[in-house]
Image (spheres, helix red, strand yellow):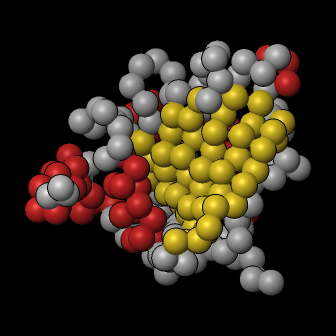
Amino acid sequence: MINIEADEAYRKQVKTNYEFSTWAGHTKEGTADVRLTDVRIGQEQIKRWKLEEAEELPAVRQRRERRYIYVAPESGGRRRLLLTTLECNSVLDAHESLIDVVMTYMAPRLPRCESKGLEVGDICFGSHGDANLSVIFARFNILAETKNAGTEPVSVDEFAREVDSIILSYYGRTPG
């Protein structure tokens, strides 16, 4: 049986741990009403990695979710990255979704990317250890999670920077 009160209490505690109230609904550009649509992270945009698989999942609550698997060609398939993007309904919705994702991690708190020298997204969390083996960030209304999916771990920093740059390139575009 699901205990909704316990789930809400845990969510509230996670928000406190991540200082949610200090960044929720804010962007680095100061524009909280930005809503990017149809953001795609295709092969032509990613330099070093080869797109192996892309899939669009059924929309839930009018949110578009896409999953991509990229492989480093020179690795013989041992280095793979899984990228999941979620097109949320608002900046705040993306930040709430970020909390949903960090709640699935075993660590009580993930480090801010800035503390590890990685400047991506409006808000970003990386992994523990010397290298970021996973990165979760929100840029405007887009949530992006990149993590290792291969047998040979690799830092996802460069890849996350490319993904963030692609998302930023949609800012100011006219839909259609």
Residue sitting at x 59%, y 71%: 59
Q: Residue furthest front?
A: 1
The answer to whether any part of residue 12 appears in the image is no
> As drawn, is 28 to the left or to the right of 165?
left
> As drawn, is 114 to the left or to the right of 118?
left
Instruction: Quadrant for the C terminus, please.
Output: bottom right
Residue 140: x and y, percent?
53, 67
> As drawn, is 19 to the left or to the right of 110?
left
Picture mark count: 0
Residue sitting at x 48%, y 45%: 136
Residue sitting at x 71%, y 22%: 79
Residue sitting at x 82%, y 16%: 76
Residue 147: x and y, percent?
56, 35
Residue 132: x and y, percent?
51, 28
Q: Residue furthest right?
A: 44
Instruction: Quadrant for the N terminus, please.
Output: bottom left
Residue 46: x and y, percent?
80, 43
> As drawn, is 98 to the left or to the right of 54?
left
Relative height, residue 130 to residue 71 (above, below): above
Relative height, residue 150 to residue 55 (above, below): above
The answer to whether any part of residue 145 appears in the image is yes
